[in-house]
Image (cartoon, rainbow, N blue to C red):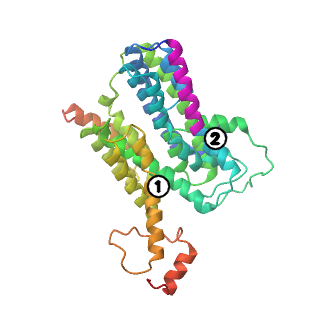
Amino acid sequence: MRSLYRTLGPELTRSIALVCLADALVGASYGAISVSSGFPLWLPMLLSVVVFAGAAQFLFIGLLAGGGSPLAAVAAGLLVNARHLPFGFAIAEVFDRRRPANHRRTVEEHAPSDSREPRNWFRQLLGSHLMTDETVAFALAQEDSRRRRAAYWASGVALFVCWNVSVVLGGLAGGAIRDTDALGLDAAFPAVLLALVLPSLTEPATRWAALIGVVIALGTTPLLPAGAPVLLALLGVAVVALFRRLRAATPTKEAPPSAPPGDSAAASHHESAEYVRGERRKS
Amino acid sequence: MSSSMTLLVAVFVLGVGTFAFRVAGPLLRERLTLSSRIESLMAQLAVVLLVALIATSATLEGDGFAGVARPAGVLVGGVLAWRKAPFVLVVVAAAATAAGLRLLGVP
């Protein structure tokens, strides 16, 4: 425990505590809203343990309370939670002690990872269940893999405990905390994620992909069910990759002014070689 | 209102489905050996997803516009984060801005 704290440092520990506090207030309002909508207390409690995803839980209760069918509520919840699939690929290394990650080409600390260490199923299954927007953002914001692991697990366990306890308390308290908007919490959450994501937006390619993704998500929201627009935003990455490929295939100076500047790290070597030689002619 | 049994089944179906989404990445990544290029692409996908989530949750409520107070709060928080302000200040300022504007009657 103490070594975990030493790895995290005071600032990250404070940040996690603060997010826990904000989450607890939202959890309490979730419990209160569920119970005052006429549902038994066990329903929000069970959802919080089994699903552990705020947005999907609110949507599930909201649809049922509005007279929707359980089938529709499950479908909507699954659609909103589908984003955990790409999240899992991005942070898989926090569950795997055997293979250090280098997604930011960080120098691995002195302890070499033991490739003979048996695969820890329990850690992987438990750790996957703690995957939320906040824990993924906390993990991605860290520089080296040891801190990434520590941040993920610490924020995951803390949030799981805070969320579940606060849902019970809110359910018991009834209508005490009905309006988290009055506290500005609805603005706090995007701000939390933004603060955590900013360090990852250093590369131009990522920035362009994110920008295109935002335009896609905002533009398709009125047309699609909840959860789908955010998933569609992933096309931003494809657009940038495609653009790169096209520009690589036509090494002329006809690139439109809005051309995203390619970063050399991701440019394939044959592309840059052709660029240098400039020997391809347009047929 | 659905019966308790129906609700119970619905919760577990949603729970199992969500867990499947969560665990697929870590389990499949074990089987695959990915190039560093693919690995950085995975990280990029996650970042794009988070940014889209930030944008939609900051500006929209359901299908409509979320008003002025919330995006204003997020914007204040974002500027502070960009200026490397402490995390606590970012969060508190975002919430305080939105709450203060609503107190003044701004939606």
Mark 1, chain letter?
A: A
Q: Secondary structure at mark 1?
A: helix
Q: Position of residue B9 (x, y in %)?
A: 55, 20
The circle on residue A4 is: 2
- Label total for image: 2
Please state which amino acid type lies under the numbered disc 1.
Pro
Looking at the picture, how far across and down is residue A280, in whole percent? 49, 84
Residue B35 against residue A278 in the figure, above or below = above
- Magenta part of the protein: which range? B4-21
Q: Judge whether residue A280 can be spotted in this image.
A: yes
Depth-wise, is mark 2 or mark 1 nearer the camera? 1
Q: Residue furthest front?
A: A283
Q: Is residue A253 left or right of residue B25?
A: left
Q: Quadrant of the N terminus of chain A?
A: top right
Q: Is residue A182 above or below residue B65?
A: above
**Observer able to see residue A154:** no
